Amino acid sequence: MLPLQRLIFRVKRFFLRFSISCYKRHKFNRLFRNCLILIVGLLILNIINGVLFSTILFFQESSDEPDYDLDTRPYYKTIEMKKRFDISGNYLIVQNFMQYQSNLTNNAHLLALNLHTNIENLHLLLNHTKVWDGPISLSIYVKSIRASDDIDYASIWLRCNRRLFKVLNIHLVISATAYERSISNQHHSHNIKYAVSCQHLTYINHTEETDSTPYPSNLLRNIARLGTTPSTVQYILTLDIDIFPVSDLFHHLVSFYTQIKLIEEFNRTLYVIPAFEIHIDTVKRGTLLPQNKRELILLWNDNQLQPLQADVCPTCQFLTNYQAWKQEASEDKIVPLFRPHYSQPWQPYYIGPKDVPTFDARFKSHAHARISQCCESFMAGYDYVVLNNVYLYRLGFLDKSQLPATEFMDDDTSVLLFDQFREDLAKHYLNTTRKC
């Protein structure tokens, strides 16, 4: 019996060891599974934190954290590589000084916005980038004996706000005097790095009266058009920096151009967008800007808004026929209203094909700067059509006391230059019966 008892004992001991081993293995598996779940959980938390942190950085427009890596010397090297003088020799041009690119929505590449400004009004660019979802081409005029400080400011400001730009091309037009006095040797300077606080970035005006070079408005407009990308852009809206599109204008225009039948008449049409001035007190009171024609007419009836240049040059916009536009019913889409027969001094803002005549660069801060281009476009066979349900606006009423601040050159000089311009047009467009 002893061998049998010994055998039974060994069998019991084997099963006991086996059960203990299985229990330990089950306990180990459970511990391993718990550790694996913990590791996966930590990885997921890290991913979520990374996404949230990136989102915060993306939407953060300004920061108190200084950026010690901003070296402005490469900007001046870009100026030296790309610089060229205009035909007069009074201005230095830097095409594509800075570029920002991102993906555009469907058909957004069809329309581009062209703008021009001086450094002092550069901040108004944000009013455009917030509502215009297509390409923007901006020409900046630099005029100062401390022009390098202005270029540094512009470069830093653009960097601080770069996340608000979709497709933006920046071009410089620099007074030759400013270039010689302040910029020409900057690319040879020692290391210059700025500690930048975007939240506290402010502009200091360095413009000096010793530089009498006038603001070259038409040259700036041409440079903006020349620098428009991508190549698929077919239609261009050219505005001054202080004339803003209503919030849904871009998408209305995209819908309008993609739905209408492309015929020859359409390709030779300039679509006029009525422009208005909103009283500055209305803005200061925090009154919401009109989002559609119905809201605009309410402000108009309350004398908080008026047609552009109503107090300065009523005839400059008279063919837009604001009263007839006001009487037309408001709709949710763009509708062509009427086709005025052009005569000067009408100078409407319009969107049209990119091959429309350029601006005559002989006109600088002249009263006839935009009038001349509108006149030539008509002579070249383009027709104007006023659009309903869309508009542009300016903050503040213009009055005659502000005219010196707009840098308009002497009216007599402007008239003489315009007379010469019309003589040139008559020689260039020999086969037309149109006149302006």
Image: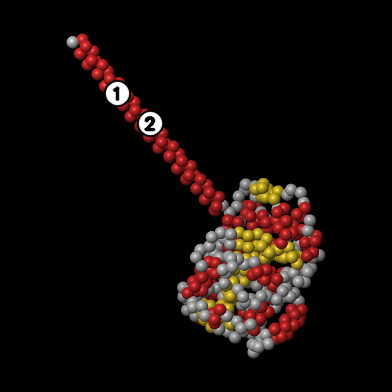
Q: Is residue 386 visible from the viewing direction of this image?
A: no
Q: Which quadrant of the figure has residue 382?
A: bottom right
Residue that extends furthest to the bottom in the rendered view of this protein: 433
Which residue in the structure is indicated by mark 2?
31
How many callouts does the rendering have? 2
On screen, residue 52 above or below 24: below
Q: Which quadrant of the figure has residue 231?
A: bottom right
Q: Residue visible at 71% across and 62% down?
A: 82
On screen, residue 183 above or below 428: above
Residue 20: horizontal and vertical position, in percent? 31, 23
Q: Residue visible at 66% across and 62% down?
A: 96
Q: Quadrant of the N terminus?
A: top left
On screen, residue 55 above or below 371: above
Residue that extends furthest to the front in the rendered view of this protein: 3
- Amino acid residing under circle 1: Phe
Residue 433: horizontal and vertical position, in percent? 64, 89
Which residue in the structure is indicated by mark 1?
18
Q: Is residue 15 visible from the viewing direction of this image?
A: yes
- Amino acid residing under circle 2: Leu
**SS of the residue under disc 2:** helix
